[in-house]
Image (spheres, helix red, strand yellow):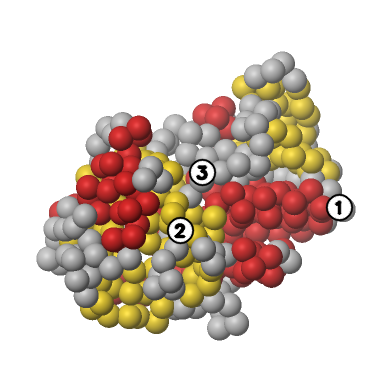
Amino acid sequence: MPAAQKVGIVGAGVGGLVLATRLADAGIEVEVLEKSSGATALGSGITLQGNALRIFRELGVWPEILRKGYAFDTLGLRAPGPEATVLAVLDDVRVGGEDLPATLGMFRPDLAAILTERARNAGAVVCYGASVNSLSRHDDGVTARLDDGGVRHYDLLVGADGLNSRVRAAIGITERPRRTGMGIWRAFVARPDEVTRTDLYYGGPAYIAGYCPTGPDTMYAYLVEDAQERNPQEGPAVMAALAAAYGGPWNEIRRHLENGANVNYTHFTTHIVSGPWHSGRVALLGDAAHSCPPTIAQGAAMAAEDASVLADEIIAAMEFDEDVFRRYWQRRAERARTVVEASVQLGDWMLDHSPEADVPGLMHRVAETVIVPV
């Protein structure tokens, strides 16, 4: 019998839903507390690398994700300017295995819906509008008090509640995300026929201009700049002005922006909890424990991997002691740190205009790390 009979998970993101599904499949009672009002996510795209796809295949949702998303195996590099000259087309490493594509782009809300349905079909209860206010830890369990006055009792509780995790604060962990100095504009737009992979443009008014197909008719485009306090209402116009320096598919993207496409802006942040990712019967995963800027598109994969490893440890243990969570942390800490530090380093090289940047070497190190199954 597993170490816990009832587990609470705070946050219905990728990591929280993967963990909920794995535990529910093992016969454990699971309740997911999600503060938002429904199964929503930022209305943009997400880039998923093969190590994330490997876990989705293990959950049995890979066929639906493949049907909803857009898979590809190459990466294009283009020059800034109106010609958008293709400088190189590189084969991406299939870090999920040769029988999975290297990369898949997807509409974020579609991914959230697929994972939510899978968790519910496994028997997990997903509660929306459930915002955790405080925690009380006991020798034999955890009590969560909600903003609406509700009270929940669990054998174990997992904070999968993102960058500004309330669970992390509640267990006395003081590390917080810091801004790295970059900001990113994202727009969800129609896909031109010529966009069949991610292309990256380095240089011009943005550090990176790029796009990723997310389905037969959709894609998301992004521009990375020096972090600024931006007015979201001005987003389409500002993004269109930056995009004027890039040709090729950006000509059509710019037309969508000028017509008021859905745009959002976020700052790049990073952190990693330096010590164990738990206290007593409460543990953290995903962005609550570690976060990185999206420069190598590993955020969702790291959360999914955390969830898979944590589920392994909970299911395998016959009774709970803190070694369950300690083993999870020991299995994940070095791998997560490698990805976080590489993601930050890539951004720092661009901010510093460093002539010493070894991007191929850095990407090779990351690929060597994540190609090994968790």
Q: Residues within 10 Å of mark 1 (few under 14, many from 20)?
A: some
Residue positioned 43% across, 71% down in the render: 193
Distance from label 3 to label 2 (Cα)?
17 Å
Q: Nearer the viewer, residue 366 or 75?
A: 75
- In-front residue for pair 20/5: 20
Seen at 40% across and 50% down, the residue is 187
Residue 148: x percent and y percent?
Answer: 69, 18
Give the alpha-carbon distance from disc 3 to disc 1, as whole Å: 32 Å
Q: Position of residue 213 (x, y in %)?
A: 46, 65
Residue located at (22% from left, 70% from top): 84
Disc 1 secondary structure class: loop
- Three-letter code for the amino acid on which mark 1 is drawn: Gly
Q: Amino acid at mark 3?
A: Leu
In front: label 3 or label 1: 3
Disc 3 residue crowd, few under 14, some 14–19, many 20+, Cα 10 Å: few
Question: Residue under circle 2?
Answer: 190
Disc nearest the viewer among 3 and 2: 2
Residue wearing tag 3: 42
**Given the image, on which type of amino acid does mark 2 rest?**
Ala
Q: Earlier in the sequence, mark 1 or mark 2?
A: 1
Write down the quadrant of residue 295 in the picture. bottom left
- Left or right: 160, with 138 as reference point: left
In the image shown, does 61 or 335 lie closer to the viewer?
61
In this rendering, would 78 be left or right of 48?
left
Q: Is residue 223 above or below residue 52?
A: above
Examine the rendered structure and indicate whether residue 357 appears above or below residue 154: below
Q: Residues within 10 Å of mark 2 (few under 14, many from 20)?
A: some
Tag 3's secondary structure? loop
Q: Label 1, on which residue? A: 27
Q: Secondary structure at mark 2?
A: strand
Q: Position of residue 222 (x, y in %)?
A: 35, 54
Q: Quadrant of the C terminus?
A: bottom right
